[in-house]
Image (cartoon, rainbow, N blue to C red):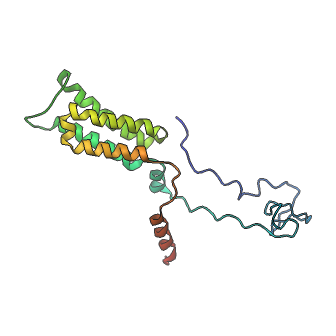
Amino acid sequence: MAAEPGPAPDRAADTTAARPADTPATTTGVPADGTGAGAGTSAGAGAGTGETVAETPAAPPVPRGFAGWRGRRPFWGGLLVVLAGAEILFTEKAPMRMVIRIGMLGLAGYIVPALMVLCGLLLIFHPVQRVFYSVLAALATLGTWVTSNLGGFFIGLLLGLIGSSLAFGWLPDQPRRRRVLRREAKREATPA
């Protein structure tokens, strides 16, 4: 299995790994010898004067736990595809008088929704190939129109198309939305 994409470590902020063992650390970013070529200065701005260049602000904290795990994959798209496949499989086994079946005793009516459930689970647990799985889920969803009671009486068809579209449009490393940033700022502002 391929490694999941994650945030790259910020090596620029870690000056202890790049510092030679014989150079003492200073608080101003200028080495003890006063040359001004320290890690905290740049050649063009304040070189040799002891001034440091302003550091970039730290990235917002990454959510931990289930919310962090969910944010690194097309979770809602995969979940909708799984629910669509399960609903279509349920309509195949429902006790109804009128059930549309094609093929060897309706074998395609079970295989296509099972493929949808598999694609939805793969979207959730293996998001590296999300484009392939979402296109396959969309094609399987459209195939249920013919093989599985008009796509689970339109409910599974709509859920599958919406879920596969969400998964196809999901991008890793999206910037945080303003609504989430406002909520985090409000949470930090209120006393605990």
Q: Percent position (x, y) of residue 22? A: 89, 56
Q: Residue furthest left?
A: 97
Q: Residue furthest front?
A: 44
Q: Is residue 15 above or below residue 144?
A: below
> In the figure, residue 55 lies in which quadrant?
bottom right
Q: Percent position (x, y) of residue 1? A: 52, 34
Q: Residue at x 81, y 65 (%)?
A: 45
Q: Is residue 69 above or below residue 57?
A: above
Task: Work out whether residue 166 or residue 125 is closer to the camera in this orientation and state it.
Answer: 166
Q: Is residue 109 above or below residue 174?
A: above
Q: Residue at x 77, y 57 (%)?
A: 16
Q: Percent position (x, y) of residue 158? A: 26, 45
Q: Residue furthest top?
A: 104
Q: Residue at x 11, y 37 (%)?
A: 95
Q: Residue at x 20, y 21 (%)?
A: 104
Q: Is residue 88 left or right of residue 45?
A: left
Q: Percent position (x, y) of residue 32? A: 89, 65
Q: Is residue 31 left or right of residue 110?
A: right
